[in-house]
Amino acid sequence: MSAFWVIIIGILVQLLIWNLYAKRVDREIIQSDPKRATPARMYMDGVDFVPTSRNILIGYHFKSIAAAGPIVGPITAAGLWGWLPALLWLILGVSFIGWASDYSAIMLSVRNDGNSLSAVAYRLISPRTRTLLFVFIFFYLLLVAGAFVNLIARVLLNPVVPLGIITLAAMGLLMGQMLYRWKMDLIMVTAITLIVTLIAIGLGPWGAVVGEGGQIVRQGPVGQLFDSLNAAIGKQPFYQYFDPTAQQFKGGTASVPPAYIFWMLFTFVFCYLGANLPIWRFAQPVNYLGFWITAIVIVLSYLGGIVGFFTNSSAVSFKLDAFTGFMAPKRVDLQPLWPMLFVTIACGAISGWHALFGSVGTARQLEYETDALPVGGGAMLFGENTLGLLSLIAISLNAPGATPQERFASGVGILLSQIFGPKFTPYGTALGFAAFVVIVITVVQLVFRLMRVTLGEWLGEAQPVFKNPHVASLISMALAAFLVLTGTWIYLWQLFGAANQLMAGLALLIVTVWLVSERRPAWYAGVPGVFMYVTTMAAILVTLWNQRLALLTSIANNQPVAIVGSAVMLILAALLFLAAAFIAYEGWQAFNRWRAAPARPAPVGGGGE
């Protein structure tokens, strides 16, 4: 298999699904209306409800949903079961589930005055379901934050990466000021801030000495500066712990260097700004700018795969096995293809984060209902899925690296070198590293934004201090830091993946109940919702078994940090499973209740028709 054919197949499937399926659902079932007032236009508050041009919102939404999932997921899954199962799920999942979930969650919120999934569940299902969803969503977001903050901090340890990310933050603040205060032209503002950020990314490997394999053997001036910074923070490990998945999955000692703690705290500062400043001031412009960086990497990498097919076919041919078996080989834990493939690839095919964020973020900025399909469905179908396919291509080229993020970056370097020549490889790799951090960090800031809102709504009535956004943000970050510093990466990732896909199943459940209550066909949401729910509940049970093994291994090796982390994740997994079981039971009851109820008149306002 060549990268060229994956690119061609991906593009053709996306175009067919868009024209033959997505547009039909929008036209015949949802019936979006450009004349209907959206919550953004009805409740303009300048903070969350902000009517936004879809030219900005498409990029903002794509960067708000595309995080580590479409990169780490396919790379991890291909390493476990081969590239063919990963490719099939990426294509089939997005075609029949992913885009529909994203788009429907946005329209559900738009038709219900911009209310969140929890608020809509309160009205359509039961008050208790709202409380259960708060519990599920908060701990689900905690897993997302823990998994992603860990990845960001590890990549920022690479000295060629930080300058680009620091510049991204500065340019995001400047872009918000230029667009919304100084009223400058969008194209000019985009050009200025994007060029400055790309120059900063390129300065990372500038002046470095490159070895025969395209790897940096001696850093340039910028790399040396951040190398010195990392060394000055401290050389002795902050602490060591036993990782039961290390050393060829048979267990080994892992360490946490002081510089890792520093970059984790840097990530929290970045996310604090995104969680608490007005959306237009930081989060929206940073994500919009991140969209262009991500788009450049995707387009150039795809172009490299096409050019390489005709000029250097061996470089863009897959070296990875197509299929390794239904049970991942050479592992002591349990990794069956079903259900674990469907939660390891956490976002490239379908994602609960998309539905959750779309309903409380993008839905409140939609200027016209007809923008929902290109913004919600389009960003998933043509954006996130394409990023997932690129990640699969990157690892299949046998790109070097110990971690998924390293293999993604080196794969991007290989693809870009097909266009610009072998000497460009370190710059392409640096761009890949920077794109990875940009992709993840721009989403994590929104994760913490949702965490502080959820914590305030969940506990704020009993303890008003939780309604304070700064207190809620700091509590959320402290809990995420605890999870990062005590968890085992592979199990933290798969537990996040299971919770993420379960969130998608629950979102489809709420959409299904809403469609039934509106007397609209619900099959396009209900059928995939059942599949995702059953699959991810099974995956949580497998994860519980593996986490039990990790706990026993850590106890046998007398490693208190790993013991605490394994115990916490066992508790979280059990809590998520029980909450999801109760939500599904009440959702099923509501489904039958609404199906048997007589047709009701349309309410006055924004809910229903």
Image: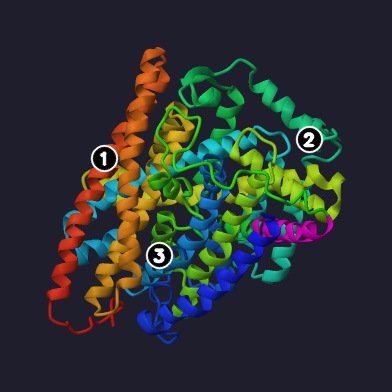
Q: Residues within 10 Å of mark 3 (few under 14, many from 20)?
A: many
The front one of 195 and 211 is: 211
| Residue span colored magenta | 292-311
Q: Is residue 233 above or below residue 107?
A: above
Residue 100, image x, y percentages? 42, 68
Q: Is residue 132 left or right of residue 227?
A: left
Disc 1 marks a residue whose amino acid type is: Leu
Identify the main secondary structure in magenta: helix
- Where is residue 14, by image quadrant? bottom right
Quarter of the image with the C terminus is bottom left
Q: Residues within 10 Å of mark 2 (few under 14, many from 20)?
A: some
Of pointers 3 and 2, the one earlier in the residue sequence: 3
Residue 215, labelled with which disc?
Answer: 2
Q: Secondary structure at mark 3?
A: helix
Q: Is residue 159 left or right of residue 577?
A: right
Residue occupying the point 33% across, 58% down:
531
The front one of 45 and 384 is: 384
Quarter of the image with the N terminus is bottom right
How is this picture coloured?
rainbow
Disc 3 marks a residue whose amino acid type is: Ser
Q: Is residue 32 left or right of residue 580?
A: right
Residue 593, image x, y percentages? 13, 69
Q: Is residue 12 magenta?
A: no
Q: Is residue 162 above or below residue 190?
A: above
Which residue corresponds to mark 1?
575
Of pointers 3 and 1, the one earlier in the residue sequence: 3
Q: Secondary structure at mark 2?
A: loop
Residue 561, image x, y percentages? 42, 20
Cα distance in 3D space between marks 1 and 2: 44 Å
Cα distance in 3D space between marks 3 and 1: 24 Å
Which residue corresponds to mark 3?
101
Residue occupying the point 59% across, 22% down:
257
